[in-house]
């Protein structure tokens, strides 16, 4: 059983460019979460999906950010017109949700974004 | 709003010492879940434990033990006979059961350094 995978692991981009990250969750997990972690801080929630439906977005997720989970499998997080403040580790997690009961989230290795 | 406080920013111990990491949480929900995650230098968050608010039994897993006290809103984590491999940042996290998709609210983490 493979864990959560993320691609790429590192991304360096120039301010103003668009970037897209991919997350592949654990296969039987129906919930997928995106978090952002800056240096010295804990991860902060950005958004989550249940199957293909995006059910909540944090206020942290500005209009430049968009996430998708087509077919309820992998997910992509796109940042348009990147800014230096977007530099962070972007973490993906997945979990199983069954019958109004949720289980622990398992995290991927993250994508470290550096905006120059 | 939910909040997690980890007042200890950094702890240094000598190998084989016992160490306790503190976690205090705030929530208005009566049903909630508490978690501990480990983030080694490689960066990937590793799930350690999940605790339900209605189960106040303490838990031991090898050298790890957790003390959940609802009366003081604390969920402390003790490592017995610490080892160098325990060096990492440890995060306490909280999720509420009512709405919010069980998203995690993390503390700022405690950096544990175990030296020989």
Image: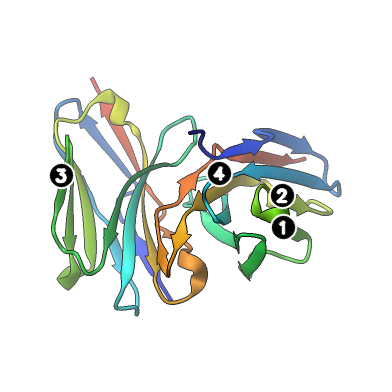
- Residue B26 position in % (x across, y down): 33, 72
Q: Chain of mark 4?
A: A
Determine the CA span between mark 4 and mark 1.
Answer: 19 Å
B83 over A21 or under it: above or below: above
- Residue at x 82%, y 46% (from the top left corner): A15
Label 3 packing within 10 angstroms: few (<14), some (14-19), many (20+): few
Give a yes or no on whether discs 4 and 1 share a subunit.
Answer: yes
User: Residue beneath label 4, please?
Assistant: A27
Whether the residues at callouts 2 and 1 have beta carbons within 8 Å, the answer is yes
Taking the spot 50% from the left edge, 71% from the top edge, the residue there is B100
Q: Residues within 10 Å of mark 2 (few under 14, many from 20)?
A: some
The image shows residue B19, relative to residue A47, as above or below, that is: above
CB within 8 Å, label 4 to label 3: no
Question: Which is more foreground, mark 4 or mark 1?
Answer: 4
Observer-nearest of A113 and B9:
A113
Assess whether mark 3 and mark 1 are in contact (beta carbons under 8 angstroms). no
Which image quarter is the C terminus of chain A in?
top right
Q: Which residue is mark 3?
A: B60
Tell me which label, 4 or 2, sits earlier in the chain.
4
Residue under label 2, please give it. Answer: A76
Instruction: Measure the C-alpha gap from mark 1 to mark 3.
Output: 39 Å
Indicate whether B13 appears above or below B32.
above
Task: Output the chain of dot 1.
Answer: A
Q: Which residue is mark 1?
A: A67
């Amino acid at each position: 059983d493979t864990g959560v995978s993320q691609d790429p692991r590192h991304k360096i981009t120039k301010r103003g460019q668009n970037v897209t990250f991919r997350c592949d969750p654990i296969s039987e997990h129906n919930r997928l979460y995106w978090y952002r972690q800056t240096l010295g801080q804990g991860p902060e929630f950005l958004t989550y999906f249940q199957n293909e439906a995006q059910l909540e977005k944090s206020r942290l997720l500005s209009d430049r950010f968009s996430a998708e989970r087509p077919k309820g499998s992998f997910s992509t997080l796109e940042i348009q017109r990147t800014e230096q403040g977007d530099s962070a580790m972007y973490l993906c997690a997945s979990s199983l949700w069954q019958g109004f009961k949720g289980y622990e989230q398992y995290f991927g290795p993250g994508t470290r974004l550096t905006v120059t | 709003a939910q909040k997690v406080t980890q007042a200890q920013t950094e702890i240094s111990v000598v190998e084989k010492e016992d160490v306790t990491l503190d976690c205090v949480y705030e929530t208005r929900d009566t049903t909630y879940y508490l978690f501990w995650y480990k983030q080694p230098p490689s960066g990937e968050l590793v799930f350690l434990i999940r605790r339900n608010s209605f189960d106040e039994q303490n838990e031991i897993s090898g050298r790890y033990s957790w003390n959940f006290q609802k009366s003081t809103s604390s969920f402390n984590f003790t490592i017995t006979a610490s080892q160098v491999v325990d060096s990492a940042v440890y995060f306490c996290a909280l999720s509420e059961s009512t709405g919010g998709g069980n998203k995690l609210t993390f503390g700022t983490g405690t950096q544990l350094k175990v030296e020989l």
